[in-house]
Image (cartoon, rainbow, N blue to C red):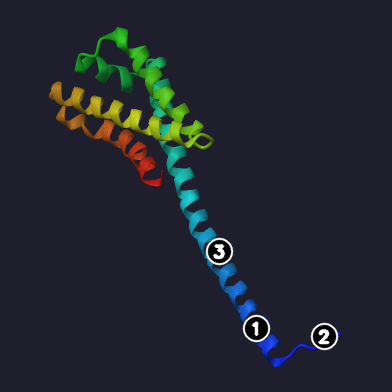
């Protein structure tokens, strides 16, 4: 039968304190990760929804999308490809939940797509419309912040 000495008791107490400190640090880290993770999921979902919505709007020839395209001089032959690019970006963002590199590439692709849209709007001298592609670009850029 062993007897717990004062030194043994103190050592046991120190080990217990270290374990509690480690658990506290782990819990604090998990909280921070959960908050960041939730924010990243929401931002990514918003970016995917916006890009997907815009892509579908091109395919269904929604007036608020195709009338400006025509006014900017974008050839009708390009419209389906542009809609497909937006849909591919939206799907890529969602796939990024499971394969992060795909999500990052999709976000980069959407940023480049909407940068091209800004250039197209500026070349058409429709300066009042520059904000629209920027609004769609912003969530895609935010995805990279959380990547």
Q: Which dot marks residue 2?
A: 2
Quadrant of the frame with the C terminus:
top left
Kindly check if marks 2 and 3 are in contact, taking CB atoms under 8 A apart as contact: no
Q: Nearer the viewer, residue 27 or 34?
A: 27
Q: Tell me the crowding category of disc 1: few under 14, some 14 to 19, or many 20 or more residues within 10 angstroms, Cα based.
A: few
- Lateral position of residue 42 relative to residue 118, left or right: right
* Total marks placed: 3
**In the image: residue 91, left or right of residue 122:** right
Looking at marks 3 and 1 on the same chain, the residue that comes earlier in the sequence is marked by: 1
In the rendered view of the protein, which quadrant contains the N terminus?
Answer: bottom right
Q: Quadrant of residue 109?
A: top left
For marks 2 and 3, give the one nearer the viewer.
2
Q: Which residue is mark 1?
A: 11
Query: Separation of disc 2 and disc 1 at Cα?
Result: 16 Å
Q: Secondary structure at mark 2?
A: loop
State whether residue 122 is above or below residue 138: above
Of label 2 and label 3, which has the lower sequence position? 2
Q: Which element is circle 1 on?
A: helix
Labels 2, 1: front one:
2
* Front position in the image: 51 or 88: 88
The image's mark for residue 26 is 3
């Amino acid at each position: 039968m062993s007897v717990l000495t004062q030194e043994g008791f103190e050592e046991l107490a120190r080990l217990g304190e270290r374990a509690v400190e480690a658990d506290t640090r782990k819990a604090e880290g998990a909280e921070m990760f959960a908050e960041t993770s939730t924010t990243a999921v929401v931002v990514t979902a918003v970016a995917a929804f916006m890009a997907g919505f815009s892509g579908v709007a091109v395919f269904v020839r929604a007036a608020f999308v195709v009338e400006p395209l025509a006014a900017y001089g974008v050839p009708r032959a390009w419209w389906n490809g542009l809609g497909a690019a937006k849909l591919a970006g939206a799907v890529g963002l969602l796939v990024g939940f499971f394969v992060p590199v795909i999500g990052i590439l999709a976000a980069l692709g959407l940023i480049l797509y909407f940068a091209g849209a800004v250039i197209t709007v500026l070349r058409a001298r429709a300066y009042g419309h520059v904000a629209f592609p920027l609004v769609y670009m912003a969530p895609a850029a935010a995805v990279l912040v959380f990547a």
